[in-house]
């Protein structure tokens, strides 16, 4: 017999949520056949059986949070004579009323009224409800069996006396307020932990600017038809990624990280651009590796593919790590400014916002132009405002004049 455990999948992952069992008790499994799907804070992974055999026992149910190293299943190896245990039948309980033993299910005795309040018949939960709402339960008439006070009686008394103590409003029960509680886990939990760590570790400074991308808009409109014929959705993001890689090469301190243990700034001479993607589970950041070596068409295609894999949770763990700089495209949904939080281990993140038609003075004349708001959040331990401003100037120059991007000057 062999036990199948939740293995260490790397990336510092310590737990996961059991999404789906792919087998059931008694199934014959092949070596490397997947036994379950587990959602980590980055992706959904399939856990394979190390050897062939029969499923003897499954530990946990779908939705459970499992720790790395915990046992998922027991497997009888091929050739072993071990029978699968039958489902156990609950033992019958014995109840007693007035000393007479009864075989069968346990029978609950009616609740005895507490001493000092023998005339008030109410369950503990109903008494608690009355206390939380500031209702004097002794003044409530019970409509339950034998005059028992039930929750509905408390509610009716509230209708007659609508005043609620202010302190009780914080803990109104579900019977009066419609609430839904969702456990913080998986991607949402990791987002929260990483963002708190980032915000309270890196001193964030924000630089805001605008780019006149009128020429870029015209170019994209002209080229997107050709791109569509090639099966590529040509978005502004592809141009922005290309412009960012050019700017990062000229301003290397934005393509860096901090080694806190050695007190060193690590300048990275490779350009892996993380792109924030809105998914049903929360924000995920797939990474385009070596973005500086790819054309605008290649960047558009890869960004589209990675985003779709992230939304469908089919993305590989390797595509969610190794970022050196991150771009979050808020403008695809809406909004003209934001203050994005740096995505560790990066030292900067670029927020891209909604393109707007605005009046701009050019050579003394007011003309309508396409304006793109940009926001750069950066780590003040590594960068100063002047460095950030120079980076933004280079980025804006390349977005304003798309010919520079088409020349692929990197």
Image (spheres, rainbow, N blue to C red):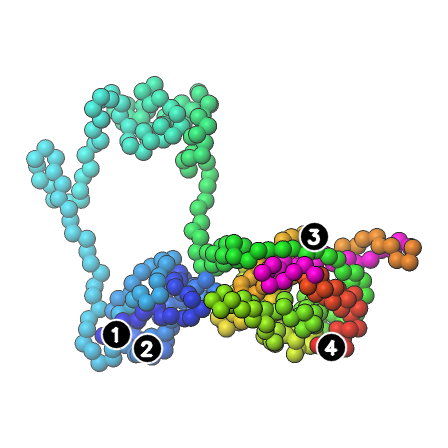
Q: Is residue 97 above or below residue 223?
A: above
Q: Are marks 1 and 2 in contact (CB under 8 Å)?
A: yes
**Residue found 68% across the figure and 59% down from its top:** 385
Q: CA distance from mark 2 to mark 3?
A: 52 Å
> Tag 4: Cα neighbours inside 10 Å, few (<14), some, or many (≥20)?
some
* Earlier-in-chain disc, 1 versus 3: 1
Element under label 3? Answer: loop
Q: Quadrant of the C terminus?
A: bottom right
Q: CA distance from mark 1 to mark 4?
A: 56 Å
* Earlier-in-chain disc, 2 versus 3: 2
Residue that label 4 marks: 408
Q: Is residue 401 above or below residue 149?
A: below
Checking the image for residue 50, the label placed there is 2
Q: Nearer the viewer, residue 233 or 394?
A: 394
Residue 41 falls in image quadrant: bottom left
The residue segment tinted magenta is 365-386
Percent x, y of residue 36: 37, 68
Residue that label 3 marks: 336
């Amino acid at each position: 017999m062999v036990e199948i455990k939740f293995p260490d999948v790397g990336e510092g992952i310590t737990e996961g949520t059991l999404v789906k069992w792919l087998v059931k008790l008694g199934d014959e499994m092949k070596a490397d056949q997947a036994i379950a799907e587990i959602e980590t804070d980055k992706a959904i992974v399939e856990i394979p059986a190390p050897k062939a055999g029969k499923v003897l026992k499954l530990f946990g149910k779908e939705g459970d949070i499992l720790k790395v190293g915990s046992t998922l299943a027991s497997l009888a190896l091929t050739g072993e004579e071990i029978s699968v245990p039958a489902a156990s039948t609950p033992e019958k309980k014995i109840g007693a009323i007035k000393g007479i033993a009864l075989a069968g299910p346990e029978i609950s005795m009616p609740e005895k009224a507490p001493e000092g309040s023998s005339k008030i018949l109410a369950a503990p939960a109903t008494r608690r409800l009355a206390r939380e709402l500031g209702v004097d339960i002794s003044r409530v008439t019970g409509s339950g069996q034998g005059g028992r006070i039930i929750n509905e009686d408390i509610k009716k008394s509230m209708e007659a006396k609508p005043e609620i103590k202010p302190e009780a409003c914080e803990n109104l029960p579900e019977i009066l307020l419609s609430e839904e509680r969702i456990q913080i886990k998986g991607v949402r939990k990791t987002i929260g932990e990483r963002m708190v760590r980032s915000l309270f570790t890196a001193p964030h400074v924000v630089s805001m600017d605008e780019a006149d991308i009128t020429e870029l808009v015209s170019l994209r409109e002209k080229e997107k038809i050709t791109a569509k014929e090639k099966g590529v959705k040509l978005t502004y993001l592809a141009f922005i990624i290309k412009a960012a890689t050019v700017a990062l090469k000229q301003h290397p301190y934005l393509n860096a990280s901090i080694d806190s243990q050695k007190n060193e700034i690590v300048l990275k001479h490779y350009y892996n651009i993380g792109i924030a993607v809105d998914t049903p589970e929360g924000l995920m950041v797939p990474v385009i590796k070596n973005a500086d070596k790819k054309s605008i068409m290649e960047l558009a295609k890869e960004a589209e593919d990675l985003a779709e894999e992230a939304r469908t949770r089919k993305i590989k763990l390797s595509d969610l790590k190794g970022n050196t700089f991150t771009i979050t495209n808020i403008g695809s949904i809406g909004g003209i400014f934001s203050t994005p939080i740096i995505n560790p281990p990066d030292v900067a993140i670029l927020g891209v916002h909604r393109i707007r038609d605005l009046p701009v003075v050019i050579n003394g004349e007011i003309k309508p132009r396409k304006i793109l708001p940009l926001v750069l959040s950066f780590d003040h331990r590594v960068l100063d405002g002047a460095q950030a401003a120079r980076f933004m100037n280079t980025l804006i120059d390349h977005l304003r004049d798309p010919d520079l991007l088409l020349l692929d000057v990197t």
